[in-house]
């Protein structure tokens, strides 16, 4: 199976058509298991919901981590008029939520949802000062056609139902850029599928590779904490999205990160210098376009916890440029995604040749 641009689009679509709000990732998890099973020697799911695909039998292990949970909402109250009040799951900006078309999930199958809209007061009925203010979540509710609270209950909507935006994967002008919800961070699993295809051609002999689709990153790296502790890898490399230059997003704030210019290699305290140097060397050697991003502190990715679990790990981060992160319509480049997967595979093959140490004795008194 080839993962050229068209096929990568189809893999992403398969993942993104299934919801995975943090803590409710079941539908998407089933699809990831199916895809991993095409390439891995074994696939397992741990107690928190991480999907772990393993190849190879080496003593040293390399863990790739990218989260497949997404931001969304949870119904917390249905009023007597049948409107659903909700709270955000993950980091939403209320400015992009007001008036959003949504799906309320009432079951575990792909069509088990009701359409709704986050009600917005018409501009004709607002005073000028109102239009200048951001409507807060506590003042929003979802209209899904219920006549009253009892009708809502009969429709299957209850406290605890999760909600996603009603948007889908599509191409922008038929080119390399695609638009869709929750590229953060299921697109990393698409990149890992490209990595698995590359490694499948010539499986590593001296390394054991754990490709981990993690959960609950959006509420604090919980999946990576559990899987990283259990696997205890020699080397752990995270994959996530990073901000790309967009209207209102200046390079002085995020660095000169652009869509279509390649994967982004993170440099900073959260990462091991010898590893990011390997990534850069392999990218240059194989003519893989790449970008460099300085991360002076917390990376905001699974790499943050993987670096320091147990006795620590060699750690790194390869990111995918993304516009409009944490909105219903994010934008990424399929070429960037493809090249990210290739760079992961090239890095793993180079690590197989290296003897990087966790601890190096620098002095002994005889």
Image: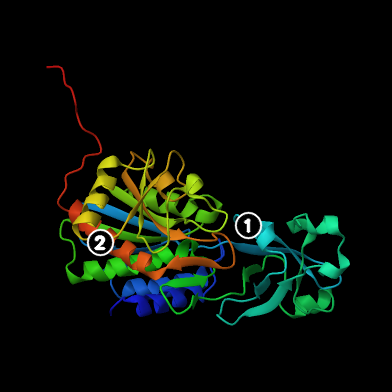
Location of residue 308 in the rendering, given as x and y in whole percent from the top left corner: 38, 40
Location of residue 293 in the rendering, given as x and y in whole percent from the top left corner: 39, 47
Nearest the viewer among 52 and 246 is: 246
Residue indicated by mark 1: 92
Left or right side of 233 for 254: right
Left or right side of 353 for 218: right
Quick one: SS at disc 1?
loop
Quick one: SS at disc 2?
helix
The quarter in which the N terminus is drawn is: bottom left
Name the N-terminal-most of marks 1 and 2: 1
With respect to residue 306, does 342 lie above or below?
below
Work out whether residue 204 can be spotted.
Answer: yes
Q: CA distance from mark 1 to mark 2?
A: 33 Å
Q: How many neighbours does mark 2 have within 10 angstroms: few (below 14), some (14-19), or many (20 or more)?
A: some
Nearest the viewer among 259 and 190 is: 259
CB under 8 Å between discs 1 and 2: no
Nearest the viewer among 257 and 56 is: 257
The quarter in which the C terminus is drawn is: top left
Residue 123: name its quadrant: bottom right
Pick out the residue farthest to the top.
366
Location of residue 139 in the rendering, given as x and y in whole percent from the top left corner: 79, 59
Q: How many neighbours does mark 1 have within 10 angstroms: few (below 14), some (14-19), or many (20 or more)?
A: some
Location of residue 298 in the rendering, given as x and y in whole percent from the top left corner: 46, 42
Residue 343: name its quadrant: bottom left
Residue at 52% from the left image edge and 58% from the top image edge: 246
Left or right side of 318 for 81: right
Residue indicated by mark 2: 345
Pick out the residue farthest to the left.
366
Residue at 86% from the left image edge and 72% from the top image edge: 81
Left or right side of 9 for 128: right
């Amino acid at each position: 199976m080839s993962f050229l641009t068209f096929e990568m689009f189809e893999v992403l679509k398969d993942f993104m058509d299934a919801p995975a709000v943090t803590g409710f990732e079941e539908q998407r998890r089933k699809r990831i298991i199916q895809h991993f099973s095409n390439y891995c020697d074994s696939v397992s799911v741990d107690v928190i919901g991480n999907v772990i695909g393993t190849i190879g039998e080496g003593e040293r292990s390399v863990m790739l981590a990218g989260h497949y949970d997404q931001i969304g909402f949870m119904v917390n109250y249905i009023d007597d008029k049948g409107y659903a009040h909700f709270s955000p799951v993950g980091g939403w900006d209320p400015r992009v939520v007001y008036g959003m078309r949504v799906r309320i999930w009432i079951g575990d199958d792909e069509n088990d949802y009701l359409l709704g809209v986050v009600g917005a007061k018409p501009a004709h009925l607002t005073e000028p000062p109102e239009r200048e203010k951001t409507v807060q979540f506590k003042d929003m509710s979802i209209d899904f056609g219920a006549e009253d609270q009892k009708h809502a209950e009969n429709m299957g909507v209850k406290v605890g139902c999760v909600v996603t935006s009603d948007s889908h994967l599509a191409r922008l002008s038929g080119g390399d850029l695609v638009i869709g919800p929750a590229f953060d961070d299921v697109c990393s699993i698409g990149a890992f599928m490209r990595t698995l295809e590359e490694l499948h051609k010539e499986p590593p002999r001296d390394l054991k590779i754990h490709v981990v689709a993690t959960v609950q990153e959006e509420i604090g790296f919980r999946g990576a904490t559990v899987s990283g502790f259990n696997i205890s890898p020699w080397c752990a490399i995270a994959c996530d999205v990073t901000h790309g230059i967009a209207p209102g997003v200046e390079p002085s704030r995020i660095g000169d990160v652009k869509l279509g210019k390649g994967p982004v290699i993170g440099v900073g305290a959260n990462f091991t210098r010898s590893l990011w140097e390997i990534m850069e060397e392999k990218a240059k050697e194989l003519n893989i376009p790449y970008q460099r991003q300085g991360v002076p502190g917390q990376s905001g990715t699974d790499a943050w916890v993987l670096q320091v679990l147990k006795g620590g790990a060699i750690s790194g981060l390869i990111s995918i440029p993304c516009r409009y992160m944490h909105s219903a319509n994010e934008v990424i480049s399929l070429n960037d995604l493809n090249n990210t997967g290739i760079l992961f595979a090239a890095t793993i093959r180079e690590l197989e040749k290296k003897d990087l140490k966790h601890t190096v004795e620098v002095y002994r008194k005889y």
